Each structure stands twice: as structure tokens, then as C-alpha cells.
Image (cartoon, rainbow, N blue to C red):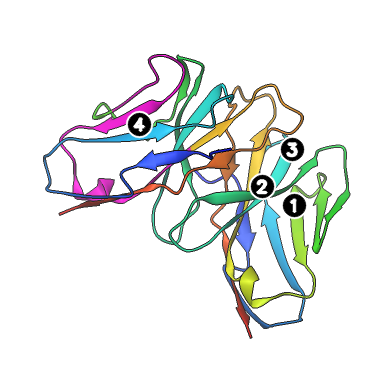
Amino acid sequence: DTGVSQDPRHKITKRGQNVTFRCDPISEHNRLYWYRQTLGQGPEFLTYFQNEAQLEKSRLLSDRFSAERPKGSFSTLEIQRTEQGDSAMYLCASSLYPGVEEKLFFGSGTQLSVL
Amino acid sequence: SQQGEEDPQALSIQEGENATMNCSYKTSINNLQWYRQNSGRGLVHLILIRSNEREKHSGRLRVTLDTSKKSSSLLITASRAADTASYFCATDAKDTGRRALTFGSGTRLQVQP
């Protein structure tokens, strides 16, 4: 039984470059979430999918951010024209909805550093 | 924005002592969850308490919920060095249309051996 996996674990990029992260959820989970976490803070919600439909996006998700889950399985999060303020841990989580308990299973995250 | 606020922000105790963390939130909720995060890793679900429950236990964990005060507490009994981590409360808000959990800012627990 594999958990949620995220790739890459670390990404260093220069300001203005585009980056893409991948998340593979637990296979039977239909919901997939993206969160962002900065040092010393809790995760902040970015967006979530149910199957392939993107059901909600946070105001934090500017026009430079786009997320996809084309076949309802893995998801990608792309940041265009990165800024230093984008430096953070990007966390992916998945869940089964409806479920007995609506708990999230998190991946280990992708740590992004924008120089 | 953060829905929950944890208190204290940081807590340092000796092994064997109990650790209590508090969480306050703003809106009505369906449930409240507690998660743990080791440094540089993802979060791990610990326990869920529903809005119609007042107390719940799981092993060395005890969670209470007071919906009238919009607050919850997490008690870890007989703490161990391995309990050193950050602990977050997360709320599933009711009637807001928001379906994703909203996390607080966390309590960083240090258990000294």
C-alpha cells in the first residue's frame, strides 16, 4: 500500500522560471488537495479536485498558478514566472469522499526555493 | 487565512510529562481534526472529533471540543522524545461552501529526554 508521493522533493529555481510539481495520490482516493506551507506556519489551502474536476481555488492561487488532474489520478501544479515569495513547501494530500472519516493523507511535500 | 489558532506556539517539556495544546477557531464546524508534522515532512492525521462530540480518546491522545467557545484541546499523556513535532488543528467549516480543511498555525512541541 503506497501513500501519497510527490516529485521532486526539492526544487531550486531562479526567479522568472517556470516549475511543475507532480503528486500521485493513494490510488482509490477521489479527492486531491494542494496546500502551501511556509516556515513556522500551518498549511494554506490552494485548490482541490474531485476526480478530474477542480472544485475550488483559493485567492492565493494567482494567475501564475495552474493545477490539473487530467484523468482523475495524478495531479500537477505549475507555477509560471516564479517569484521569491513563492518559496515554500508545496504539500499534496488525498482523501476518499465520502468516507467514514474525512481525513487527509499527505505526501512529504516539494520544497521550492526561488533564488 | 488561518481558521484555527493554536496556543501555545511552542512548548518544551520533559519526557513523561503531559502536553496540552489548545486550538481556537472562528466559524461553525462539521468536525475538527488534529495532525502531526515532523520537521520537513508531510502531515499525519492523529484524531478527528465531530461537532456533536465533546471528548475523544486514542491511545495516549485525548481531544476535547467546546463548540460554544469554538475551541479544542489536544492532550498527549506520558510524552516521549519521539512526540517531538509540530501539531496542527484543522477544521471542516460548516455551511461556507468550503470543502477543504483549514489549518491553524501550529504548536511546536519539544520533548526533552
Residue carrying label 3:
B31
Which of pointers 2 and 3 lies earlier in the amino acid sequence? Answer: 2
Residue A47 in the image: state x and y as whole percent.
Answer: 44, 29
Q: Residue B71 carries which label?
A: 1
Which of pointers 2 and 1 lies earlier in the amino acid sequence? Answer: 2
Residue carrying label 4:
A61
Amino acid type of the residue that numbered disc 2 sits on in the rendered structure: Tyr
**Chain under disc 3:** B
Query: Do dots 2 and 1 share one subunit?
Result: yes
Instruction: Give the CA separation, mark 2 to mark 4.
Output: 23 Å
Query: Do dots 4 and 3 share one subunit?
Result: no
Q: What element carries label 1?
A: strand
Query: Do dots 2 and 3 share one subunit?
Result: yes
Amino acid type of the residue that numbered disc 3 sits on in the rendered structure: Asn
Q: What element carries label 2?
A: loop
Dividing the picture into quadrants, the one containing residue B68 is top right
Instruction: Give the CA separation, mark 2 to mark 3.
Output: 11 Å
Which segment did they paint magenta? A66-92
Amino acid type of the residue that numbered disc 4 sits on in the rendered structure: Leu
Whether residue A56 is visible, yes or no, is yes
Residue carrying label 2:
B25
Q: Which quadrant holds the N terminus of chain A?
A: top right
- Residue at 12% across, 39% down: A17
- Residue at 62% across, 59% down: B6
Residue B15 in the image: state x and y as whole percent.
Answer: 70, 82
